[in-house]
Amino acid sequence: MNEEHTVLDFFSQEENLPLALIAAEHLDGIRLRHNNRFWETLRERLDALIAQNALPWSSELTEDRNSEDCLVGLRLEPLFNQRTFLRPFMEQQLLGESYRIYYGLMWNTAPEPAQKNLPAVEALRAHLGTAGFKHSDSFLAWQWSPWYPRRKDFLLRFSKQQDQLLKDAMRPWHALLEGYGEPLHLANHALNEVPRSATISLDQLRSKSAG
């Protein structure tokens, strides 16, 4: 602990500001590499779960649109084409100065009211609601995790106890794909049977709002 205080005291001195800034940039790069590695290794485990259970999903990594080469999450795509569907996801969101991971089920497009009110969709939402999930226009269900992927405690645990951390991070995926797998399948099947007058993707909505 004394060594840590010595180093911090050194960098806090005005004459050492140039070195402190160089060290800060270097540490930011380390955080980013560990952050990306977390999502990449978690994806490997998720792909193994999908293959083991022959689930009709494929995984894809989510990148930060505002930061090059920065991974921020995982989401699933159905193997078969479907215009409107609900997909499991896990992503990190910036809250103030910290990122926090959340997960749940998100819409791939902005749904129509009739689609939101389908019995199978309502049943799934209610089922997840009893488990503590919240919902919004973009998410049928979402919930915060206890993980802040850029903080010291998370990075140290990922470095020293990677296997256990990844096992913990896979629990929400097991719940979404196994615990809620059947009601999710029924909801997506019902959505696939309902014609849509117009499909507006969330990306299009974001582009319009940004413009």
Image (spheres, helix red, strand yellow):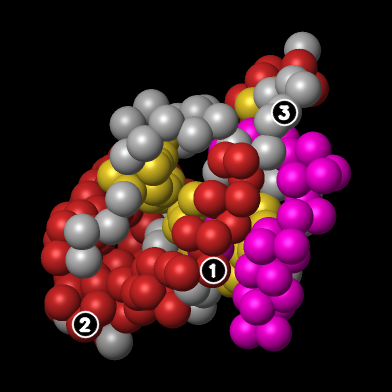
Judged from this view, the residue extending furthest toward the right is 113
For discs 2 and 3, the disc positioned in front in the rendered view: 3
* Image x and y of residue 150, in percent: 41, 60
| Crowding at mark 1 (Cα within 10 Å: few <14, some 14-19, many 20+) | some
Marks 3/1: CA–CA distance: 22 Å
The residue located at (40%, 63%) in the rendering is: 149
| Residue 17 magenta-highlighted | no
At 57% across and 40% down in the image, what residue appears?
A: 192
Is residue 20 toward the left or the right of residue 84 in the image? left
Q: Amino acid at mark 1?
A: Pro
Residue range (magenta): 103-131
Q: Residue at x 41, y 48 (%)?
A: 75
How packed mark 3 is, by other alpha carbons closer than 10 Å (few <14, some 14-19, many 20 or more), is: some
Q: Secondary structure at mark 1?
A: helix
Give the SS element for disc 2.
helix
| Residue 86 in sight | no
Identify residue for label 2: 164
Q: Residues within 10 Å of mark 2 (few under 14, many from 20)?
A: few
Up-down relation of residue 108 to residue 140 (above or below) = above
Query: Residue at coordinates 69% horizontally, 24% vertically from top-left?
Result: 199
Quadrant that contains the C terminus: top right
Q: Quadrant of residue 162?
A: bottom left
How far across and down, in percent of the image, does residue 83 sit?
56, 30
- As drawn, 53 above or below 26: below
| Mark sitting on residue 183 | 1
Query: At which x and y percent is residue 66?
Result: 52, 28
150 above or below 146? above
Identify the image quadrant of the N terminus. bottom left
Q: Residue 24 versus residue 155: which sits nearer the camera?
A: 155
Q: CA distance from mark 2 to mark 3?
A: 44 Å
Q: Tell me the quarter of the picture where residue 166 sits.
A: bottom left
**Residue highlighted by disc 3:** 196
